[in-house]
């Protein structure tokens, strides 16, 4: 197959794609944030005068908010600037704007901040040295608590042949999008307007409007080209500050984070501690207890979701007669927890798959066979009582097992082959809509998302529209508008773009066909085609140019039809929920990965020599884009597996806020993976597609951990699997 | 990035005169800039003048009677691409390839690396064991210093405010090796590195450790333990034991003290075996 040219390639290669970092406006000021020097403490004073004294500088702090905000004063629980308690290091305390970048940085440095530092809560385990007790839920440091139970757990543990107990620890990881957060804001005639590099223009509108206490209708958000999101650009971050500075100065204000600030202020996956207790009877899982301590940082957006969804991935896609899970979200003095590609699922899979390996070894069963004996089949029940299917994981596991056997036959000393599984579900989010405009020579798909680099918008939606209409892709254009013009959509996250907007396209296409059928008085179904450069409607032997079917008022707009897709999920058995919220899955997406590694036992260095992914996709919508998503996810997952780790000092300061000491993989560490896309197990998306942005990252750290153990015997229970941890596990230190 | 004036003197005399004309605290000297520009970008350095050496005729590589002299502003990539360097000074070639990435090595220089005296320098341990000399030029002429005397501490050297590094001179070729451990193969800094060289008369060794603050150091007692002849397993064992005690191995965010202790022995033995030709050492 000839590789297709990505629709965004030309504009990006020519340097014509304007990212958030590139925005410019006449009379623009540059913004900068004044941030907390400590992770926890009381703000004694904040003196903006030295900044005000600099030429052309506008500075705002908490005292200025009443005059800048409408009377509603925004969300009381989420302070734009804290007035007393500092919650994390580098929390914004004030903001400045100046005519130059350097001037803004100077002004920010000139603001005098006096704080009384207090001991920061950084280490997740220091708060509850044993484990949170029954009263812990009332602690102000517990942000979320979820608890579910099913079956005779106590009985199963009492009568078990074997109980395996283990504790795992995972690290904070950053998204490392190439482009830091950046936006350009203005406030004119009562309209608050921001152009921003975001995964979700409508999400930013909702978030910023509620923060500032303004109606959503008075805020217009326009997405720019996005230099990578990976979850980090789903919610607002810099936009409220830029808007307030624009309002205070009466000028457009551009606020862009430096890469250091991106690390320090960005919201991402934080550390966790996971404890398993697994009862085995006659070679089968009899009951499982899973406990999770998740670092929520200074706040946990989505509270129960972070813990109540994560728990699913700690139970995993395995039959479990009885279980009990408890999850705590713990407040620490770090930035708020935020999503990172398949939020927290790779960490869960690492812990669970490593643990299942340990259980299988403990009872002397082949780890592959042990997984195969328990993995869900269609019609099984999830621990929370949802019916499973259609699910391609068993097929993926079989294919992975066969490949692993072949690789194992070829390896030498110091090498090992590992298999691990992952599963996920397309998140339909708050839903979305599209508008189709069928013109004489093109079909325009108007929607509210910008391409963030994955290809899901420009390649994915175009492929769906081509398949739905029968038109060639070059006849389809993907248009977007700002939030005042585009139909609503909740954003590019949760692997949902093709799934949700694709379904909306299919629905809108059906509406187009119905309208055309009426106008043609057709008795047979209407198809679209191209004749001599024009789009034609075809029914039976009739072929009519669209041009002739448009009404006078449709000359500009074309024939318009809208489609919607809102969440459609299964249900769980609520009787199994003791406390908190748990969530059903929209569909079931399985991944099985195989890695071959070579490990230097004396130094702990790991080389990933071969990698293969078997990915359940439902149906392939755009093969190149799908393959690229899997390859990219593997590269990113290898970072989580081997090298990426946010390190905080005891005082709560991020010690490695830069790309030198926060190490993402380079091409030197990433082998070209073998990618197999498995079709035939349809999901919730158009034509049975399943979301693909997140699932392929999930099994990567687990697969590497299992392979390292195969190669060396080193059982590492902490991410990342650094060379040092491997040497330590081998008892050489 | 903050603004500064860029000066590009065309001759050595003009460069020295420029150095003398500007107060040292207000100016910096720019060679490849791969380290310095990060400091300026981060605000750790805020010079009003930057004196670039790019027009000076020092991008040279000369062989005199089989020994090598490298001009201080020669790009590391040029050094790397000279096949004779890898043949005669294997440790130097291995260390150059360890620096940053190909793109960075097109800019980075040996003189710049030495002048910046970073504790994590990949090149300095090799310069130490190869007994390299630093040629300095100043208003009153030139002088030479051994690299060991040139380095004072982390980020501090014996260079005078009005001196420049003109070249680095390597004495006659000898068996040598440089091995490092790092989290990532490229674009990274060594957690620990070992350089070894065997004297041309095969009677003495030099061993240096790098990648640990405050600076790369020679380990004479470890070198002594290797003896004069081909070291056997008992010599290697003694040398490993001494190496793990010989230097204060600190913990930092790149590695723990125990891990560095493990590495120092492993890398030392491997480096000696590599210098001996990859075969069995004894």
Image (spheres, rainbow, N blue to C red):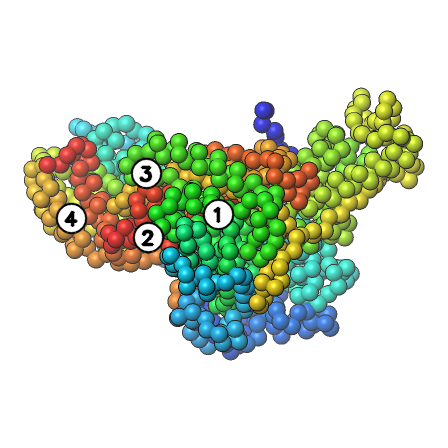
- Residue drawn 56% across the image and 60% down it: A308
Rendered view: B46 above or below B64: below
Rendering coords of residue A718 (x, y %): 38, 55
Which residue in the protein does label 3 denote?
Answer: A415
Say which label, 2 or 3, has the lower sequence index.
3
Which residue in the protein does label 1 denote?
Answer: A374
Q: Chain of mark 2?
A: A
Q: Chain of mark 4?
A: B
Rendering coords of residue A168 (x, y %): 40, 57
- Of the two numbered discs 2 and 1 in the rendering, the one whose residue sits closer to the viewer: 1
Say which label, 2 or 1, has the lower sequence index.
1
Element type at marker 4?
A: helix
Q: Specify whether residue A713 is in view.
A: yes
Asked if labels 2 and 1 share a chain, the reply is: yes
Element type at marker 2?
A: helix
A478 vs B205, nearest the viewer = A478
């Amino acid at each position: 197959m000839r590789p297709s040219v990505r629709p965004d390639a030309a504009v990006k290669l020519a340097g014509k794609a304007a990212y958030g970092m590139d925005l410019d406006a006449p009379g623009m000021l540059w913004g900068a944030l004044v941030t907390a020097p400590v992770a926890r403490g009381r703000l004694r004073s904040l003196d903006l005068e030295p900044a005000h004294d600099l030429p052309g500088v506008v500075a705002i702090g908490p005292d200025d908010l009443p005059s800048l905000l409408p009377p509603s004063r925004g969300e009381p629980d989420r302070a734009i600037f804290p007035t007393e308690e500092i919650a994390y290091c580098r929390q914004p305390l004030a903001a400045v704007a100046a005519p130059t970048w350097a001037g803004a940085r100077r002004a920010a440095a000139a603001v005098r901040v006096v704080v009384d530092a207090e001991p920061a809560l950084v280490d997740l385990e220091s708060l509850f040295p044993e484990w949170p007790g029954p009263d812990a839920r009332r602690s102000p440091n517990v942000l979320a608590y979820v608890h579910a139970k099913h079956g005779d757990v106590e009985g199963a543990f009492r009568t078990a042949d074997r109980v395996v107990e283990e504790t795992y620890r995972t690290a904070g990881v950053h998204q490392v999008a190439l482009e830091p957060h950046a936006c350009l804001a203005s406030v004119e005639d009562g309209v608050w307007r921001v152009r921003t590099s975001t995964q979700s223009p409508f999400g930013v509108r909702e978030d910023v409007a509620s923060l500032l206490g303004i109606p959503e209708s008075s805020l217009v958000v326009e997405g720019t080209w996005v230099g990578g999101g990976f979850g980090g650009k789903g919610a607002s971050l810099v936009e409220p500050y830029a808007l307030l500075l624009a309002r205070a100065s009466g000028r457009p204000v551009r606020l862009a984070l430096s890469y250091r600030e991106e690390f320090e202020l960005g919201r991402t996956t934080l550390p966790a501690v996971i404890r398993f207790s697994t009862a085995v009877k006659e070679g089968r899982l009899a009951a499982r207890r899973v406990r999770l301590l998740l670092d929520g940082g200074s706040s946990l957006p989505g509270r129960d979701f972070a813990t109540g969804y994560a728990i699913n991935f700690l139970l995993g896609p395995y039959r479990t007669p009885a279980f009990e899970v408890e999850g705590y979200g713990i407040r620490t003095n770090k930035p708020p927890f935020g999503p990172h590609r398949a939020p927290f699922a790779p960490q869960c899979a690492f812990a669970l798959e490593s643990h299942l390996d340990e259980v299988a070894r403990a009872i002397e069963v082949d780890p592959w066979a042990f997984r195969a004996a328990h993995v869900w089949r269609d019609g099984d029940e999830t621990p929370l009582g949802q019916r499973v299917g259609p699910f391609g994981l068993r097929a993926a596991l079989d294919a992975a097992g066969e490949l692993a056997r072949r690789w194992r036959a070829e390896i030498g000393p110091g090498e090992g082959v590992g298999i691990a599984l992952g599963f996920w579900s397309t998140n339909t989010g708050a839903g979305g809509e599209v508008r189709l405009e069928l013109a004489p020579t093109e079909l325009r798909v108007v929607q509210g998302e910008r391409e963030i680099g994955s290809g899901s918008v420009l390649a994915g939606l175009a492929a769906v529209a081509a398949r739905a209409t029968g038109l060639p892709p070059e006849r389809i254009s993907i248009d977007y508008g700002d939030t005042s013009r585009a139909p609503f959509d909740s954003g590019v996250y949760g692997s949902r773009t093709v799934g949700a907007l694709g379904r909306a396209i299919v629905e809108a296409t059906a509406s187009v066909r119905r309208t055309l059928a009426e106008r043609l008085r057709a008795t047979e179904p209407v198809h679209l085609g191209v004749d001599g450069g024009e789009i034609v409607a075809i029914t039976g032997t009739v072929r009519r140019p669209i041009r002739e079917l448009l009404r006078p008022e449709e000359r500009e707009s074309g024939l318009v039809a809208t489609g919607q897709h809102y969440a459609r999920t299964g249900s769980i058995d609520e009787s199994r929920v003791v406390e908190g919220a748990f969530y059903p899955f929209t569909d079931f997406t399985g991944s099985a990965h195989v890695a071959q590694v070579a490990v230097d036992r004396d130094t702990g260095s790991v080389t990933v020599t071969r990698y293969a992914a078997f990915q359940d996709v439902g149906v392939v919508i755009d093969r190149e884009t799908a393959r690229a998503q899997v390859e990219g996810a593997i590269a990113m997952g290898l970072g989580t597996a081997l090298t990426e780790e946010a390190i905080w000092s005891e005082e709560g300061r991020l010690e490695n806020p830069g790309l030198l000491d926060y190490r993402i993989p380079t091409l030197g560490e990433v082998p070209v993976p073998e990618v197999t896309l498995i079709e035939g197990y349809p999901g919730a998306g158009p034509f049975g597609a399943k979301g693909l942005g997140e699932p392929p990252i999930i099994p990567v750290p687990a697969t590497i951990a299992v392979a390292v153990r195969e190669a060396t015997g080193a059982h590492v229970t902490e991410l990342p699997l650094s060379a040092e941890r491997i040497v330590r596990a081998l008892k050489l230190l | 990035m903050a603004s500064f004036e860029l000066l590009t003197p065309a001759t050595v005399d003009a460069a020295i005169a420029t150095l003398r004309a500007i107060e040292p605290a207000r100016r910096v000297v720019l060679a490849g800039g791969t380290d310095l520009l990060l400091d300026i970008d981060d605000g750790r350095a805020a010079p009003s003048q930057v004196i670039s050496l790019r027009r000076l005729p020092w991008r040279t590589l000369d062989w005199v009677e089989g020994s090598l002299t490298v001009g201080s502003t020669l790009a590391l990539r040029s050094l790397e691409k000279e096949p004779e360097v890898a043949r005669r000074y294997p440790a130097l070639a291995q260390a150059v390839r360890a620096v940053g990435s190909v793109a960075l090595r097109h800019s980075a220089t040996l003189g710049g690396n030495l002048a910046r005296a970073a504790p994590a320098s990949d090149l300095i341990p090799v310069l130490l064991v190869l007994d390299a000399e630093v040629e300095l030029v100043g208003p009153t002429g030139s002088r030479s210093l051994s690299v060991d005397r040139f380095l004072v501490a982390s980020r501090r050297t014996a260079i005078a405010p009005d001196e420049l590094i003109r070249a680095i001179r390597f004495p006659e070729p000898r068996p040598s090796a440089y091995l490092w451990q790092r989290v990532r193969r490229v674009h990274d800094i060594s957690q620990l590195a070992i350089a070894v060289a065997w004297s041309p008369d095969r009677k003495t060794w030099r061993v240096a450790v790098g990648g640990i603050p405050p600076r790369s150091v020679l380990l004479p007692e470890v070198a002594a333990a290797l003896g004069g002849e081909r070291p056997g397993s008992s010599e290697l064992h003694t040398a490993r034991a001494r190496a793990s005690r010989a230097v204060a191995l600190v913990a930092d965010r790149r590695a723990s003290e125990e891990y560095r202790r493990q590495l120092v022995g492993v890398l030392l033995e491997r480096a000696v075996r590599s210098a001996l030709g990859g075969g069995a050492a004894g």
